[in-house]
Amino acid sequence: MSISNVKHAPAVDAHTEKHLIPPTPALTHAYDNSTANGIPMIAVSPSQGKFLSLLTTMSGARNVLELGTLGGYSSIWFAQALKANGSGGGKVTSIEIDSARRDVSIANLEHAGVKVPEEAEVVLGAGLDVLPRLGQEIEAGKRVGFDFVFVDADWENQWHYFDWGVKLCKGKGSVIYVDNVVRRLLESGIVGPAAKREEGVVDLVENVGVDGRVDAVVVQTVGAKDYDGFLMAVVK
């Protein structure tokens, strides 16, 4: 099949979302309210949200860690999946650095019928400041480890977030999913036609490849949100 067929990706997305992911008031409100409050439209697409929801169900996750809340769109997908799983006591813990966005995300979660902070907690702060605190809480028995970690935050720290994600997981079988990995590879010059690695760039894929704690793969994606891809790893 010719690569030129990629031009049909938006039409395919529209068709598949129409039949497989009908809009819901909760998720539509999250998008609309986020836009109305000036939050950039960089959240996951409906197809990506549904995919994350299915992964949460398939993995049997009860506790999800998310880095990069934005307007809470993906947080709602996770919270709904946990509830549908019958995961009584399951919870989404999301980290957001911007206080205004945190306020919007909480409003969106509550509008979706998600109990805050019982079913979803939005922690304010920089990821690399918050993650060690979560680790301390887990060690002290004040918080359980995570079954699923979703990284959708600043690209230059993808490896550091991944490393912390593994540390904070419950153990064997836990999943770490890092979004925007392919665009990071291309835009940082690690791969691509003009490949010239920027000074100081840490290659997530390279580091994960020699990390004996996990088994991982990168999947390239194309759709209405253009060409990209994610890395998914399972803790051994």
Image: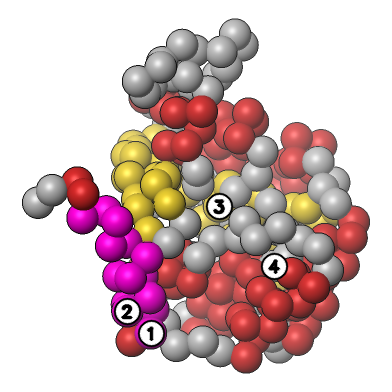
Asked if the magenta segment contains residue 12, the reply would be yes
Tell whether label 1 touches label 3 (CB within 8 Å): no
Give the magenta part as a residue range: 5-18
Could one spot residue 220 in this view of the protein? yes
Main secondary-structure element of the magenta-colored stretch? helix
Q: Amino acid at mark 4?
A: Gly
Element at label 2: helix
Disc 3 or 4, which lies upstream in sequence?
4
Distance from Cα at disc 1 to Cα at disc 4: 22 Å
- In percent of width and height, residue 171 lies at 48, 46
Residue 211 at least partly seen = no
Q: Residues within 10 Å of mark 3 (few under 14, many from 20)?
A: many
Q: Is residue 161 above or below residue 224?
A: above
The residue mark sitting in front, 2 or 4, is: 2
Mark seen at residue 15: 2
| Residue 150: numbered disc | 3
Q: How does the figure colour the protein chain or chains?
A: secondary structure
Give the number of the disc on residue 18.
Answer: 1
Q: Is residue 69 left or right of residue 49?
A: right
Q: Name the mark nearer the viewer: 3 or 1.
A: 1
Residue 151 x/y as whole percent: 58, 47
Q: Quadrant of residue 120?
A: bottom right
Q: Tell me the amino acid under the disc marked 3.
A: Phe
